[in-house]
């Protein structure tokens, strides 16, 4: 397993996709309403879970998330989001950062756990910004510590490409 410590610059937009702490978001995105469209929706009031299926599209400002299925969990007492799970072949997201760059990512499964302060991208996980890329079976990002771990899994290796121009900007 390789551990990469990346700046908030590189992953700030990724975190906002999952509606996390406002300081990570493109300034205007966190103030925008969340819109979700899908072919169907199922609300389970007992478990405070909403499942969106079929051509799911979530937007919030510059954030775009597409998936075959999106499951949103809320705390029964507070109504706050506790977890968001996206499934697809693959699920994709993009967001514009405060620096004006586009961050894109994809994985077959995306899980953002609010309480753990962690995003886990599983199976065919990829992150792209400009021409730089991280690929692996599992990419886990712990938000508050800004610690990213990428695992190739099953004898595979993690692949990272960092363009020289991005290194010079740091």
Image (cartoon, rainbow, N blue to C red):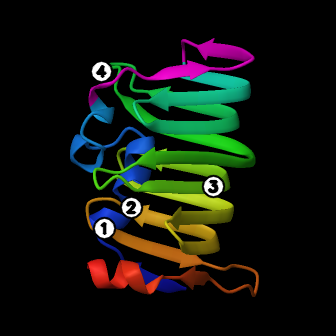
Which numbered disc, 2 or 1, marks the residue that appears first in the sequence?
A: 2
Circle 1 sits in a helix, a strand or a loop, which is it? loop
- Per the model, the C-alpha gap separating discs 2 and 4 is 28 Å
Circle 3 sits in a helix, a strand or a loop, which is it? strand
Where is residue 114 shown, x and y percent of the image? 37, 44
Image quadrant of residue 40?
Answer: top right
Residue depicted at 47% across the width and 75% down the height: 149
- Per the model, the C-alpha gap separating discs 2 and 1 is 9 Å
Q: Mark 4 points at which residue?
A: 78
Q: Which mark is residue 106?
A: 3
Which stretch did the figure color magenta? 31-46
- Per the model, the C-alpha gap separating discs 4 and 1 is 27 Å
**Lateral position of residue 103 relative to residue 168, left or right:** right
Where is residue 74 shown, x and y percent of the image? 43, 26
Q: Nearer the viewer, mark 4 or mark 1?
A: 1
Instruction: Determine if the magenta segment contains residue 41.
Output: yes
90 is higher (above) or lower (below) than 64: below
- Per the model, the C-alpha gap separating discs 3 and 2 is 13 Å
Which numbered disc, 1 or 3, marks the residue that appears first in the sequence?
A: 3
The reply to whether dot 3 and dot 4 touch (C-beta < 8 Å) is no
45 is higher (above) or lower (below) than 150: above
Image quadrant of residue 161?
Answer: bottom right
Which numbered disc, 3 or 2, marks the residue that appears first in the sequence?
A: 2
Q: Mark 1 points at which residue?
A: 146
The reply to whether dot 2 and dot 1 touch (C-beta < 8 Å) is yes
Residue depicted at 30% across the width and 43% down the height: 26
- Per the model, the C-alpha gap separating discs 3 and 4 is 30 Å
Q: Nearer the viewer, mark 2 or mark 4?
A: 2
Q: Quadrant of the C terminus?
A: bottom left
Mark 4, Cα crowd under 10 Å, few <14 / some 14-19 / many 20+, is few
Which numbered disc, 3 or 4, marks the residue that appears first in the sequence?
A: 4
Where is residue 108 shown, x and y percent of the image? 71, 53
């Amino acid at each position: 397993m390789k551990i990469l410590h990346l700046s908030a610059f590189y992953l700030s937009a990724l975190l906002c996709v999952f509606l996390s702490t406002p300081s990570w978001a493109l300034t205007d995105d966190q103030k925008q309403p969340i819109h979700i469209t899908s072919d169907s929706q199922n609300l389970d009031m007992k478990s405070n879970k909403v499942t969106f299926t079929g051509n799911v599209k979530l937007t919030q400002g510059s954030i775009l998330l597409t998936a075959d299925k999106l499951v949103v969990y809320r705390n029964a007492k507070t109504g706050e989001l506790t977890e968001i799970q996206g499934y697809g072949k693959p699920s994709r997201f993009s967001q514009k950062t405060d620096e004006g760059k586009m961050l894109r990512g994809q994985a077959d499964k995306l899980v953002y756990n609010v309480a753990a302060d962690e995003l886990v991208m599983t199976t065919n996980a990829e992150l792209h910004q400009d021409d730089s890329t991280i690929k692996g079976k599992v990419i886990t990002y712990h938000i508050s510590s800004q610690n990213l771990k990428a695992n190739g899994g099953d004898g595979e290796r993690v692949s990272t490409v960092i363009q020289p121009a991005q290194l010079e900007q740091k």
